[in-house]
Amino acid sequence: MADDGNTEERKQRLASINFWDELLALRDRQRENRKNGLMVIKGSKLPQETNRQGLMKWYLHPSIEDTILSTHMFFEQEIPPGSRSGRLKFQGEQVIYILEGKGYTLIDGVKHHWNAGDVLNLPLRKPGIIVQHVNEDMEKPARFVAAEPNFFHTTSVDRGSGFEQIEDAPEYKR
């Protein structure tokens, strides 16, 4: 049975922690990270991962702790010729700059065409949005960078709308 939060054991465990001191310790860790954190993140020094969304390089991520900022997520994604990203449901509020290529993004089933130099704004919607990117060029990859606020630490990964991988990118192999 799940702990309902009203047990004496929990009360004793909480009483053993000075939460004010914990806040000050967190502040000190954050200050140290900012003092020694990376100001410039070189894309050439980042690995490209193949994940359920496709081919990505992470510049800023909730699990990357050696950078000055932790308030944003920032990544580069490549879509091979004629391929597509995974399909994802998430809250939205993401800005994408198309570096190269041509294609389209499906947002809740509606096609939005883009080319290199375009900016795509993924809307923030309470029930979330379903998104998938498609490279229409059969010879050249499409590449973009994307930024969004790092709500993961403040609102959880689900961010109120759910966070579900609906379809994997073709390049992803478990």
Image (spheres, rainbow, N blue to C red):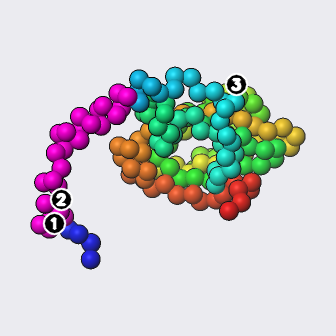
Residue to which mark 2 is pinned = 13
15 lies left or right of 171: left
Residue to which mark 1 is pinned = 9
Residue to which mark 3 is pinned = 117
Q: On screen, 38 above or below 109?
A: above
Q: Answer yes or no: do the residues labelled 3 and 1 have beta carbons within 8 Å?
A: no
| Residue density around tag 2, few if under 14, some if 14–19, many if 20 or more, within 10 Å | few
Amino acid type assigned to the residue bearing label 1 in the image: Glu
Instruction: State the SS at label 3.
Output: loop
Q: On screen, 114 above or below 86?
A: above
Q: In this picture, which residue range is highlighted in magenta?
A: 5-32
Quadrant in the rendering for residue 113: top right
| Residue density around tag 1, few if under 14, some if 14–19, many if 20 or more, within 10 Å | few
Q: Answer yes or no: do the residues labelled 1 and 2 have beta carbons within 8 Å?
A: yes
The x and y percentages for residue 87 are: 62, 53
51 lies left or right of 3: right
